Image (spheres, helix red, strand yellow):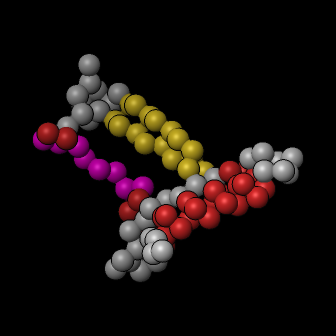
C-alpha cells in the first residue's frame, strides 16, 4: 500500500502510542515530539487580537525550492494579510 509521508507518520505514531500504552508515562510522545501551534488574527483597524492554540505533532512545511528548513520555517510563521472576501471584520 502506498502512502504519503503524513499518512505514514500518522499510522506510525498510532502504532507507537499503542505499543507504549502499558508504560506509566501517558503523554510520552506528546512530551517528546509535541508542540503547540498558535494562530493569530489581528485587526488592522482596531488592533483587536484573536488567538487560537492547538496541540500538534506535525508541521507541514513547504520545502520545495527552499535553501533550508529554516527558510521553510520562516515562511511558515510569516504573516498573511486578509483582504477582499478573506478580510476579517471586528464586531
Foreground: 21 or 55?
21
Total marks in image: 0
Foreground: 38 or 71?
38
Foreground: 26 or 65?
26
Could you tell me which residue is drawn at 24 percent across and 33 percent down? 88
Q: Which residue lies furthest to the top in this view?
A: 91
When asked about the image quadrant of residue 2, the answer is bottom left
In reply to whether residue 82 is colored magenta, the answer given is yes
The quadrant the C terminus occupies is top left
When asked about the image quadrant of residue 33, the answer is bottom right
On the picture, is 11 further left or further right than 42?
A: right
Q: Which secondary structure dominates the residues rendered in magenta?
A: loop
Could you tell me which residue is drawn at 20 percent across and 37 percent down? 87
Residue 81, position in %: x, y? Answer: 25, 47
Could you tell me which residue is drawn at 78 percent across and 56 percent down? 20
In reply to whether residue 7 is colored magenta, the answer given is no
Residues drawn in magenta: 77-84
On the picture, is 3 further left or further right than 41?
A: right
Residue 85, position in %: x, y? Answer: 14, 39
- Examine the rendered structure and indicate whether residue 11 appears above or below residue 45: below
Residue 17, visible in the rendered structure? yes
Amino acid at each position: 500500500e502506498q502512502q504519503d509521508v503524513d499518512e505514514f507518520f500518522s499510522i506510525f505514531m498510532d502504532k507507537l502510542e499503542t505499543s507504549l500504552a502499558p508504560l506509566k508515562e501517558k503523554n510520552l510522545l506528546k512530551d517528546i515530539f509535541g508542540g503547540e501551534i498558535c494562530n493569530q488574527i489581528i485587526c488592522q483597524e482596531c488592533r483587536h487580537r484573536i488567538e487560537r492554540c492547538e496541540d500538534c505533532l506535525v508541521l507541514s512545511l513547504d520545502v520545495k525550492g527552499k535553501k533550508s528548513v529554516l527558510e521553510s520555517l520562516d515562511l511558515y510563521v510569516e504573516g498573511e494579510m486578509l483582504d477582499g472576501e478573506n478580510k476579517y471584520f471586528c464586531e
